[in-house]
Image (spheres, rainbow, N blue to C red):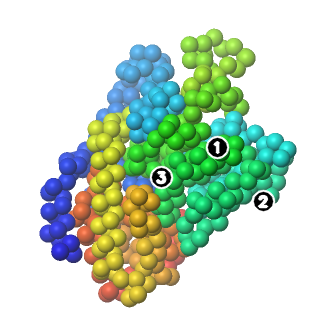
Amino acid sequence: MNLEKEFALARDSHDPLASFKNRFYIPPAAVYLDGNSLGLMSVDSEKSIIRAMKEWKTRAINGWLEGEPPWFYLAEETGSMAHTLVGAKKEELICTGTTTVKLHALLSTFYKPLKNRKKILADELNFPSDIYALKGHIKLRGLNIPEDLILVAAKNGFLEEKEIVRLMTPEVALIILPSVLYKSGQLLDMAYLTKEAHERGIIIGFDCCHSVGIIPHEFDEWGIDFAFWCSYKYLNAGPGSPAFLYINRKHFPLEPLLAGWFGYLKHKQFDMLLDFKHAQNAGGWQISTPPILGLASVKGALSVILEAGIKNIRKKSIQLTEYFINLVDQLLPSGKFGIKIGSPRNAQQRSGHVALIGKDNFYQVFSALKARGFMPDFRPPNIIRFAPIALYNTYLDVWRTVNTLKEIIDKLEYLKFPQKRLEIT
Ligand SMILES: *Cc1c(COP(=O)(O)O)cnc(C)c1O
């Protein structure tokens, strides 16, 4: 019977990824369930950062060519390490800068409004930062909000792909969607959406912050035009670590208009010429000097994921979230406790976390969980997200989490906590 603790222990003892837990620093006495917001530090990342610091200490400026690997090529090298995770060619990837800045850089190239084809199609559930960037670019080009930004409306908290396709009208110049919706964890069918967009002559790009590192992708096969994602969530590279950008190689000749000297033809960058000629690969979309310490962290973090294998990670992640949902269904039945599963029940449409939607007291429930050492996160108005991570969470973590949640609610333990939210939840 899977309600028993022994069931969880037995699953853990047969888990082929179990040993990876020792590669991570887990906050003391905690069950960490927030790897979808900030992945934990691995020993590999730590070592890699220390090594880069040592190079800075001992080699100073010479690190650019004499570092191991040389800092000058680190953005290209680290980017290309992700090629098997996303199904891309090495030269279609670069790692530097940050997520939202990447989106701005991509929009500078890919948003080309014409008289009768000038709108951007996005969705109302996307991460707000993306929408701010889209609005900025629409205004920069003298166009108007809301006319020129179509936001697909959600139905019952989810997006319907058919509805997105219905809105792909001849006026749409560009589509920007998340691979996974950050609140519900709904995974969109990127292959299908790309096919439909291209049949209508529309460029399409994806924000993959919530999917790379946990779900295998096939960008080239699907033919998507571009993508971008951060490295501090499922990729575990640390707060503010550099982001990735993917550009389909058919677009390499297009001009990066948010240009900077690190995007220059690599072997001629230090000729310091004023006429900008961009590298004919994803590197052309770099802007500034890459953050070497951050890249060192990404390199270490990625090596762990590659070693574990993205398919194995996805498999265990699905098993953990299925188990979580199953326990909630049994221990906290919706009719009795008013808690609903806010993520797709079909595992193929779900990413790495499970959202629970509660009642007005749910922020207090969240605070009570934290006081007991459980670390999920809270998204207003009444969602708690639980991300059991394949590389460092166990079946026992899931068992303890749902049982504790039940206790907190059953015994009204949450009443001891204030309703007012902290700045970061
Ligand atoms: C986390 C996240 C971001 C983060 O943007 P930053 O510029 O790195 O702060 C952007 N988009 C989505 C969908 C995210 O989940």
How far apart in space, not on screen, are marks 2 and 1 (Cα)? 24 Å
Rendering quarter of residue 308 = top left
Image point 60% across, 21% down: which residue?
279
- Which mark sits nearer the N-terminus, 2 or 1? 2
- Which mark sits nearer the N-terminus, 2 or 3? 2
Disc 3 target residue: 210
Ligand 1 within 8 Å, label 1 CB: no
Q: Position of residue 180 (x, y in %)?
A: 50, 55
Disc 1 target residue: 198
Q: Looking at numbered disc 3 in the image, what kind of residue is underneath it?
A: His
Left or right for 354, reference 101: left
Image point 49% across, 61% down: which residue?
186
Image point 32% across, 68% down: which residue?
324
Left or right for 318, reference 262: left
73 shown above or below 115: above
Q: Which mark is residue 146?
A: 2
Please name whichever residue, 414 or 33, is drawn nearer the observer in this view of the structure: 33
User: For mark 1, does the 10 Å Cα neighbourhood hold few (<14), some (14 to 19), or many (20 or more) residues?
Assistant: some
Which quarter shows the N terminus? Answer: bottom left
Ligand 1 within 8 Å, label 3 CB: yes
Q: Quick check: marks 1 and 3 in contact, CB under 8 Å?
A: no
Q: Position of residue 422 (x, y in %)?
A: 51, 68
- Give the number of the mark in front: 1 or 3: 1
